[in-house]
């Protein structure tokens, strides 16, 4: 349940942030290009406040939803499932489109829509209305982003997340303070009740719009997003590129050596049938390995030796009996015979059972 909660928290934040980013980038670019003075509808300080809303506050608000047992009612996601679902893309695409249309419409035609004369004071009021509308659209869209599925109740579990409520109230209070006393710093001016009602109403449209988006069928949108290559084609299977790097045979040899080492038990059994068969079977293959492959093996074997804490054996150990005791040929090791450690006591059960068979 916690795993699904964390996964959903990341998706909620991404859905909200990308919607805000797309709107801010498009609006800023279009208005700056259309302006004779190359000034954007959103000033640098206003964008800074919007960035705080969509990054810091949104991350704290959307990532703190507690897990709910309803998360277990859906099927688990596949390991290869895309991070963005069709429902998320629908919300991002339509919410961003709505916000872009509203902001650009009031930016270019706000004076005519509100019936204002073309004066600098009225133009400042319109630009403040645009900024206020954009901010409240993000606040209401953050509530809408709390749900990733097609369930229409976006307020489910809202009062269990005190962080979300507190952060949303902070955003509203700070935005009101900015409009009333921000002045030249935020390039805003005080608005009347009608302008406040318009900006709040246009921002609140994000909630019913989110409900409408959830009611729309997914099939046409899925085909559209697949055509845009935002989603993978379901009928396509993963393929191997012909130019992909080939498997290095040295890695196979390293794996075989490490498998051999894992079959040694405490150093007492120096040889076994597994060791003999494994290394004799690889003897011919070793001769075919080129020098670069051998050099690939060396660092891996050294690193694994150091990590395992291996050290050179002292004289009289079982590291190489043929080196210190020629009478006991190492050929016996390949015959599957056992050797008992020299320090094994005669009364040891191992020595009594196997001591005379070396």
Image: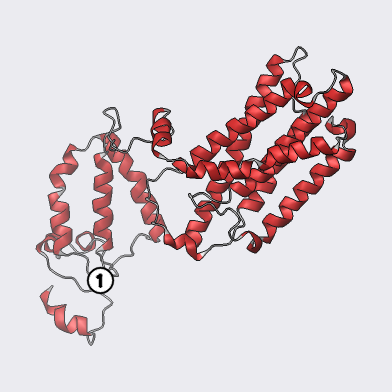
Q: How is the image coloured?
A: secondary structure
Q: In which quadrant is the C terminus drawn?
A: bottom left
- Tell me if 293 is positioned left or right of 178 in this view: left
Q: Nearer the viewer, residue 181 or 255?
A: 181
Category of crowding for the residue at label 1, using alpha-carbon neighbours closer than 10 angstroms: few (below 14), some (14–19), many (at least 20): some
Q: From what the image shows, is residue 343 above or below residue 33?
A: below
Residue with the most extreme top position? 36
Q: Position of residue 115 (x, y in %)?
A: 80, 23
Q: Nearer the viewer, residue 341 or 82?
A: 82
Q: Position of residue 167 (x, y in %)?
A: 72, 52
Mark 1 residue element: loop
- Tell me if 155 is positioned left or right of 349 in this view: right
Residue 199 picture quarter:
top right
Residue in view at x 63 percent, y 46 percent: 142
- Tell me if 300 is positioned left or right of 143 in this view: left
The reply to whether residue 139 is visible in this rendering is: yes
Residue in view at x 13 percent, y 50 percent: 281
Q: Residue at label 1?
A: 268
Q: Position of residue 3 (x, y in %)?
A: 48, 58
Residue with the most extreme front position? 115
Residue 100 picture quarter:
top right
- Tell me if 270 is positioned left or right of 183 in this view: left
The reply to whether residue 84 is visible in this rendering is: no
Q: Nearer the viewer, residue 41 or 214?
A: 214
Number of on-image labels: 1
Q: Position of residue 68 (x, y in %)?
A: 53, 63
Q: From what the image shows, is residue 341 above or below residue 34?
A: below
Residue 295 picture quarter:
top left
Q: Nearer the viewer, residue 239 or 211?
A: 211
Residue in view at x 13 percent, y 63 percent: 273
């Amino acid at each position: 349940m916690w795993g699904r909660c964390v996964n959903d928290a990341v998706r909620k934040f991404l859905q909200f942030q990308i919607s805000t980013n797309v709107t801010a980038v498009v609006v800023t670019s279009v208005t700056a290009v259309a302006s004779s003075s190359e000034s954007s509808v959103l000033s640098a300080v206003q964008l800074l406040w919007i960035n705080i809303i969509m990054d810091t506050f949104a991350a704290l608000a959307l990532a703190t939803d507690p897990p709910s047992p309803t998360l277990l009612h859906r099927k688990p996601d596949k390991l290869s499932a895309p991070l963005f679902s069709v429902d998320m893309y629908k919300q991002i695409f339509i919410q961003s489109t709505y916000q872009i249309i509203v902001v650009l419409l009031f930016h270019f035609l706000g004076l005519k829509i509100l019936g204002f004369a073309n004066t600098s004071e009225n133009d400042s009021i319109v630009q403040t209305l645009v900024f206020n509308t954009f901010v409240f659209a993000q606040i209401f869209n953050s509530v809408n982003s709390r749900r990733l599925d097609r369930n229409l109740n976006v307020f489910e579990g809202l009062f269990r997340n005190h962080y979300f409520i507190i952060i949303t109230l902070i955003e509203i209070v700070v935005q009101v303070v900015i409009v009333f006393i921000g002045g030249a710093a935020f390039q805003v001016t005080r608005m009347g009740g009608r302008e406040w009602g318009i900006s709040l109403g246009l921002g609140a449209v994000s909630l019913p719009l989110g409900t409408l988006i959830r009611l729309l069928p997914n099939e046409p949108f899925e085909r559209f997003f697949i055509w845009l290559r935002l989603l993978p084609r379901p009928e396509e299977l993963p393929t191997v590129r012909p130019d992909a790097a080939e498997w290095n045979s040295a890695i196979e040899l390293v794996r075989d050596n490490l498998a051999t080492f894992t079959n040694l038990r405490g150093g007492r059994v120096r040889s076994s049938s597994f060791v003999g068969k494994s290394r004799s079977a690889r003897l011919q293959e070793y001769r075919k390995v080129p020098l670069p492959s051998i050099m690939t093996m060396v660092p891996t074997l050294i690193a694994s030796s150091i990590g395992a804490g291996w050290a050179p054996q002292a004289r009289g150990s079982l590291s190489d009996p043929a080196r210190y005791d020629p009478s006991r040929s190492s050929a016996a090791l390949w015959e599957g015979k056992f050797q008992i450690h020299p320090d094994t006591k005669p009364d040891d059960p191992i020595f009594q059972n196997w001591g005379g068979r070396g």
